[in-house]
Image (cartoon, rainbow, N blue to C red):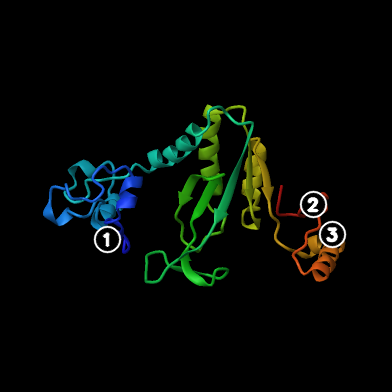
Amino acid sequence: MNDHDDLRKDSTLALLVGKRDLTGERRVREQDRRNPLAASSTLNRLELGIPKSAISDRYKRIAADNEAMDRLLVDLFLESYRKPPRKIWLDLDATDDPLHGQQEGRFFHGYYRCYCYLPLYIFSGEHLLCARLRTADKDASSGSVDELQRIVGQIRARWPKTRIIIRGDSGFCREAIMAWCETNDVGYVLGLARNQRLQQALGKEMEEARLACERTGEAARCFRDFRYRTRKSWS
């Protein structure tokens, strides 16, 4: 909101969102002229407006249909293809959104070493399918199953034969996600956090990579495949 009072004057941003009056010179009220986009107070009403009561609310008559906006992101992705692809990858990611004041839901995150929010993103290639703002006192994977269930269901309603595979780092290697994927015929490629059992199994390859790095001065990778399971935490 703090930045929007400056961004509302940006003609390029107005063009991107489909405004015809790119300079705001034709706006009705004098106080709005030279500002092609809405003020932060209008966005605030959009954020706080409740759809069911918006029509009778004096100050919050603009309300967002969050479910429709969620569907729109997936619809735009589906419409970008001329025919259904054989396979798609859904990339899950959580990242920090640093805070610099006393915002609601402010928490310190040990990994990012700052006060922040921890939004969840789901992409397929360059297409954003989900952006969900969350507080930083949650696990990186929090809410992922609900979002995947919604997105995968919408995709399969249009593309029933397309193979879907999710990808994520070790923050998404969770029982709930893997169990949901296996139940719903969704493939997954997820990172595993370092632990003693993995280090023992990969000791030879890690040593080969270390020697190659010392020899060339560049990052090195070695690969090995093997079966792995936890003793109690995963089904």
The local secondary structure at tag 1 comes to helix
Q: Which residue is mark 1?
A: 5
Q: Are the two marked residues, 1 and 3, in contact with CB atoms closer than 8 angstroms?
A: no
Give the side of residue 158 with respect to residue 2, left or right.
Answer: right
Image mark for residue 49: none
User: Where is residue 196, by image quadrant?
Assistant: bottom right
Q: Earlier in the sequence, mark 3 or mark 2?
A: 3
- Dot 2 amino acid type: Tyr
Residue at 51% in and 39% down: 150
- Dot 1 amino acid type: Asp
Neighbours of disc 2 within 10 Å: few (<14), some (14-19), many (20+)? few
Image mark for residue 201: 3
Q: CA distance from mark 1 to mark 3?
A: 56 Å
Neighbours of disc 3 within 10 Å: few (<14), some (14-19), many (20+)? few
Instruction: Report the residue that reaches farthest toward the right.
Output: 204
Residue at 32% in and 62% down: 3
Viewer-proximal residue, 39 or 97?
39
Q: Position of residue 206 (x, y in %)?
A: 82, 64
- Dot 3 amino acid type: Ala
Q: Are the two marked residues, 3 and 2, in contact with CB atoms closer than 8 angstroms?
A: yes
Q: Position of residue 80 (x, y in %)?
A: 50, 34
Q: Which residue is mark 2?
A: 228
Q: CA distance from mark 3 to mark 2?
A: 10 Å
The local secondary structure at tag 3 comes to helix
Q: Nearer the viewer, mark 1 or mark 2?
A: 1
User: Where is residue 163, by image quadrant?
Assistant: top right
How many numbered marks appear?
3
Q: Is residue 42 above or below residue 195?
A: above
Residue at 28% in and 50% down: 46
Q: Earlier in the sequence, mark 1 or mark 3?
A: 1
